[in-house]
Amino acid sequence: MISLYGAKAFPFTESRITEIEATLKEEGDALPRQVKDIKHQHALKLDMAKAYVCDCCNGQGKFWAFSCDVCDYDLHPACVEEACSDCLMKVRDINLTA
């Protein structure tokens, strides 16, 4: 329990673990199932990971990550920079006039 949930699991009871897992599920439910990040060529899927290293900030992460099955690329949810259609239109307009 300690290695998976750390100090958050204290007191180390089944009811505490159930609370933590419910909170994690709520966090995951609030995230999109898939994103397209501007730093990566493939779509990234929401994944539950025990531990990973974010390929953007190189920080360690656990629990929720956006992952690429093709490249083994992982991002913290906070490190995702989604491409929006308005932003892409502006980039195209700049490239066309340059």
Image (cartoon, rainbow, N blue to C red):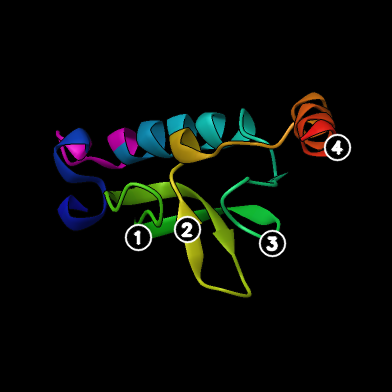
Q: Are marks 3 and 2 in contact (CB under 8 Å)?
A: no
Q: Nearer the viewer, mark 3 or mark 4?
A: 4
Q: Are marks 1 and 2 in contact (CB under 8 Å)?
A: yes
Question: What is the x, y in percent for residue 63?
Answer: 41, 48
| Marks 1 and 3, how far apart at CA | 18 Å
Tell me which corner region of the image, top left, top right, bottom left or bottom right, holds residue 79.
top left
Q: Find out whether residue 10 is within the magenta segment.
A: yes
Mark 2 or 4, nearer chain start? 2
| Marks 4 and 1, how far apart at CA | 40 Å
The number of numbered badges drawn on the structure is 4
Q: Which residue carries the number 3 mark?
A: 42
Give left or right: position of 64 versus 95.
left
Q: Which residue carries the number 2 mark?
A: 74
Q: Find out whether residue 27 is within the magenta segment.
A: no
What stretch of residues is rendered in magenta? 9-16
| Marks 3 and 4, how far apart at CA | 25 Å
Mark 3 or 2, nearer chain start? 3
Q: Amino acid at mark 3?
A: His
Give left or right: position of 90 versus 66.
right
Question: Which residue is depicted at the point 32% across and 40% down?
Answer: 17
Q: Nearer the viewer, mark 2 or mark 4?
A: 4
Element class at badge 2: strand
Residue 96 badge: 4
Q: Which residue carries the number 1 mark?
A: 52
Give left or right: position of 52 versus 38.
left
